[in-house]
Image (cartoon, grey):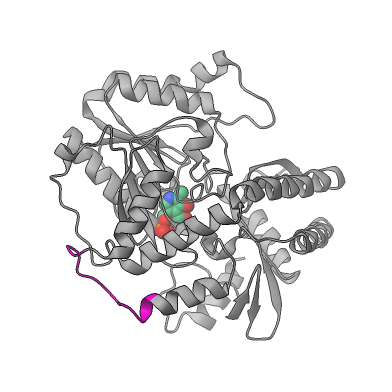
Amino acid sequence: MQNRNLEMLEKYGQFLLPVLPFRDIVITRGKGSTITDANGDTYLDVNSGQYCAALGHSNPEVASLLLKIANKIQDTDTATLSEEVLLCAEKLHHLTPEMNSRIIFLSTGAEANECALRYAKHIKERPGIIAFEQGYHGLTHGTAGYSMSRHRIRPPLPHSYTISAPQHFGTEPGDFQIEEQLSQFKDVLAKYADQIAAAIFEPIVSGGGMIFPDARFFKRIRELCNQFDVFMVFDECQTGFGRTGKLFHYQNLGVVPDFVVAAKAIGLGYPVACVLANGHTVTHEHFLMQHYSSHQNEPFAAALMAFGLDTIQSQGLLESNVAKGQKLLGIFNRLEKSFNCIRNGRGVGLMGGFDLFVEGVDDYRATGTRFCNLALENKLLLQHCNNGRTIRFLPNFYISDDDFRMLESKLNCTLQAFLSE
Ligand SMILES: Cc1ncc(COP(=O)(O)O)c(C=O)c1O
């Protein structure tokens, strides 16, 4: 593995900053659920780029929208608004009635998390943040301190508290179990509530292992946040924008956060993020903190997002994402029956995954990489998470029955190769 990484660094690292081992393919174009490389090989992409190209690659309507906006304006100064921004903010506000949302458009998920957490700390006048040990909120200086990679931050971020994300595959936890899962959260609040501004969670913990906490867990978190006067922040960078069958996953769970952070799919493949602040709890009197960045409230971001919102509504994509999610689960179930090394197939809407299981293996990093490399040989682009243990799937919303058939066949070939090595 190490050799392969070194080889890739040698091949591509001369002019690029090598922050991660590159795959040995160079993409020339994408179309729908596929991408084609410089050798003319076509790969199935079941992760919509980096979970961003929600309406597929080279979507002609997205392309013409970008052209239209590029012909109109390139950039606005940070304090000047455009009609696109006003229109999209109003749209989003009406689609999130529980939140009475007020919106800021930004560029990346990490930037939006920074903004929400900065706001939360400013309002509560406290420095502390609680997060899941397995959570991921980006890799800026601040967000990395609240993500599973926190141990790499030097110096470690002070007042950063963690709790375990609750895991229960295939079984519904009882109320007693839910209270047990909350014990760490209650302990942290009991000791440090006067230091804590916010609790930030991915409502589905993706990179940390495709963990789906029960709605009752988050409802109790909401109650405890109210009780201890702590903001609840949902990082919906992956779950948001219809992927799980509602516009935001908090709407599936029936809890209303104080801040919702969205990114990835909302930009349809381009750098767009946003923060929705709950207008009931983050009121105008709080808006004294200034947040300033070059690409804040950009018309192209709002135009892309508004187009995405209209498309999701007019084409019934929320419903079809749920139906397609069932197809994904069907594939996982059939694979589990044929291959003992696949376990815990799980998912909600178009966000799913399964675990690899190999007798005698505890550290799955090399195993997960080997699996994804074999998939690549079968012209299937996959990503592992959870330190190699879990393979995750976040396809674009137009993934077709043919794509699903191709996926199942490629996974079958990959698994056969995986077991025969
Ligand atoms: C849940 C979650 N939050 C935040 C981020 C960071 O987003 P970005 O990479 O756009 O900064 C990611 C990116 O993978 C994510 O999955």
Q: Residue 233 at x, y = what percent? A: 36, 38
Decide which of 205, 390 is in the foreground and name it: 205
Can you give x and y, in whole percent of width and height, for residue 261 in the image?
Answer: 38, 47
Left or right relative to 336: residue 323: left
Residue 126 appearing in the image: no
Q: Which residue is drawn at 72% across and 61% down?
A: 400
Task: Say which quarter of the image contains residue 141.
Answer: bottom left
Q: Toward the viewer: 387 or 260?
A: 260
Q: In which quarter of the image is the N terminus?
A: bottom right
Residue 44 drawn in magenta: no
Residue at 15% in and 47% down:
289
Residue occupying the point 54% across, 82% down: 11
The extreme bottom residue here reads 39
Query: Which portion, as a residue range, is magenta?
Result: 69-80
- How many marks overall? 0
Q: Vertical placement of 216 versus 240: above or below?
A: above
Q: Nearer the viewer, residue 241 or 181?
A: 241
- Figure quadrant, ligand 1: bottom left
Residue 153 screen position, x and y as percent: 33, 51
